[in-house]
Image: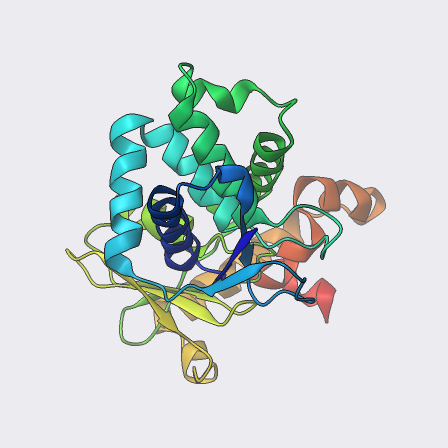
Amino acid sequence: MHVFICENTPNGILTGVYDAWELKIQERCSHADIYLVSGQPDNYELFCDYHTVAPSAEKAGKVVSTLNRKLGHDFYETILTAILSIDLSGKKKMDKANAVYQTIVAALYSPKGARVLDSLSNPYIYRVFELSRATASEAHHLKGFLRFSELQNGVLFSTIHPKNNALPILAEHFTDRFPQENFMIYDETHQLAAVHRAGKNYMLVDASDINTELLQNYSENEARFQKLWLAFFDSIAIEARTNPELQAQNIPKRFWKDAVELRHFCE
């Protein structure tokens, strides 16, 4: 068995896919004899050859190009959202990197091509399906719940606390929606930020050293509108009909801390 230890990033896992496939061709081994893991394994097993994968944008790009060309963009999007998921099940379930690899193998070898994603009886494909669904669902919620605030320098800023690494999906969405705006989305959970300059593409940067106090310096208009919005929110509320459970159904509580009108309920 050949085990490929991949960095838990899109570049890392897709590079692992490239290296694993290359080894399969060179050594004429079976895809069933290859296993990918995201991050360091808890235990090293006997009779396994371990390969540490060095992330390569070039190799990952070749895999992306192949998936888009042979299987279509929708298939690639499913693979990407599965990779961006944060597996909270620990080691109880199949590693996402291996599920991604074996799903790609199944699609490229099957006459059904991308339609193998409908074969949910396949454990690898079902694993990709549930991981992709978790990320896509959270990203869909955040597209509606994310709130931008205007800073004193005119930059639109937002903080999010997602479970999964939904930031690249959100950055792509808002770059398309606000191409002429300077904005920044800060993922406090994963200490990443998407930075977009007007008319340019976005960049993902490490935000572990970000000064959050500076990001609370709102413009005069922003402070005024927040005050007006809170006054409106309070004025239309009917105390006798307050229903926190219904509010939580409409906007899950984990999103409240990032909403102007709801964050005081979290304090």
Q: Quadrant of residue 39?
A: bottom right
| Residue at 61% over, 56% down | 163
Q: Residue at x 42, y 77 (%)?
A: 215
Is residue 243 shown left or right of residue 84? right
Answer with left or right where residue 79 lies relative to residue 250: left
Question: Residue 197, position in %: x, y?
Answer: 21, 63
Quick one: which residue is furthest to the top in this view?
A: 111
Between 254 and 165, the one lying in front of the other is 165
When asked about the image quadrant of residue 13, the answer is bottom left
Residue found at x 52% / y 63%: 50
Residue drawn where x is 27% and y is 69% of the image? 154
Locate the C terminus and report the quarter of the image it occupies. bottom right
Q: Position of residue 55 (x, y in %)?
A: 36, 64
Relative to the observer, which residue lies in front, 101 or 137? 101
Residue 35: x and y in percent read: 55, 49
Q: Is residue 159 visible?
A: no
Left or right, 31 with respect to 259, comes to left
Relative to the observer, which residue lies in front, 180 or 19? 19
Q: How many marks?
A: 0
For residue 227, say whether it is visible: yes
Residue 184 location in percent, x, y?
35, 65
Residue 15, compared with residue 224, is above or below; it is above
Residue furthest to the left: 199
Question: Quick check: 35 above or below 113?
Answer: below
Color theme of the render? rainbow
